[in-house]
Image: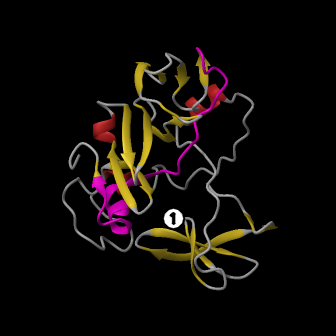
């Protein structure tokens, strides 16, 4: 998710109908510039090179979101036919409309990953690894990060691990509740908010991350490290 404000001006976006390495390409209606959805950057046109501001969001189940936000209104568009048209695609080994740009068999092509890129250092955290290790203290691009994964919903979020100049390390208490080893504060792992202890009320800073199929992530980041495999 990105902000539509660029240099204090509001832009509106649409779907261009184009793809770059199987990733949706947007356009803005003000200048006609093309933007990559995955990296949030203008790739062609007047604003080429401009980056959209990342806004924290969650990829989760409707049931989980509704439980956390009971007053939410949602647009339900549905689908045609008796079967979900995406069902056969997700169950198959097809790699999008265009196919793979780069072959990399370190993971199954449709393994889901939480992808992070910091200072030119991309890292993929496979769901298969996060299922067994749902709280990961790591460093990417020279920056200490925290990855928290909800096994029940497949939701992965990434945070900075430094709070007011103090570097924290985290471990799991139960499901999505985590604790930092330095102060003993308990945190909600999906919102990043301290809920009990010395740091109560403080929120961890979110870092941009992407939940993606492996084939989609490695096409954009062919030199990506894979946590649990390369580390």
Is any part of residue 154 visible from this angle? no
Q: Which residue is farthest right? A: 9
Residue 183, x across and y down, in percent: 50, 18
Residue 72, x across and y down, in percent: 72, 35
Q: Is residue 86 left or right of residue 30?
A: left
Residue, x 80% and y 66% (percent of image)?
8
The N terminus: image quadrant: bottom right
Q: Write the start and end of the magenta stretch as one range.
A: 197-225
Q: Which residue is farthest front? A: 165
Q: Is residue 51 above or below residue 124?
A: below
Q: Is residue 105 left or right of residue 84?
A: left
Q: Which residue is mark 1?
A: 39
Is any part of residue 198 visible from this angle? yes
Q: Is residue 115 above or below residue 136?
A: below
Q: Nearer the viewer, residue 29 or 135?
A: 135
Q: Is residue 33 above or below residue 7?
A: below
Residue, x 51% and y 64% (percent of image)?
39
Scheme by which the image is coloured: secondary structure
């Amino acid at each position: 998710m990105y902000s539509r404000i660029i240099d204090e001006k509001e832009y509106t976006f649409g779907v261009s109908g184009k793809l770059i390495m199987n990733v949706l390409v947007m356009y803005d209606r003000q200048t006609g510039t093309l933007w990559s959805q995955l990296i949030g950057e203008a790739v062609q046109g007047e604003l080429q090179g401009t980056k959209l501001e990342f806004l924290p969001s969650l990829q989760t189940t409707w049931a989980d979101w509704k439980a956390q936000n009971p007053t939410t209104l949602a647009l339900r568009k549905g689908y045609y036919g008796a079967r979900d048209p995406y069902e056969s695609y997700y169950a198959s080994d097809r790699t999008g409309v265009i196919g793979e740009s780069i072959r990399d068999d370190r993971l199954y092509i449709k393994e889901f990953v939480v992808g992070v890129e910091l200072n030119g250092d991309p890292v993929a955290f496979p769901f298969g690894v996060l299922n067994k290790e749902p709280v990961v203290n790591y460093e990417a691009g020279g920056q200490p990060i925290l990855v928290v994964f909800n096994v029940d919903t497949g939701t992965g979020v990434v945070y900075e691990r430094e709070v007011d100049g103090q570097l924290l390390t985290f471990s799991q208490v139960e499901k999505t509740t985590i604790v930092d080893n330095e102060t003993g504060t308990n945190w909600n792992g999906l919102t990043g908010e301290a809920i009990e202890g010395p740091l109560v009320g403080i929120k961890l800073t979110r870092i941009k991350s992407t939940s993606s199929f492996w084939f989609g992530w490695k096409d954009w980041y062919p030199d990506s490290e894979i946590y649990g495999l390369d580390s």
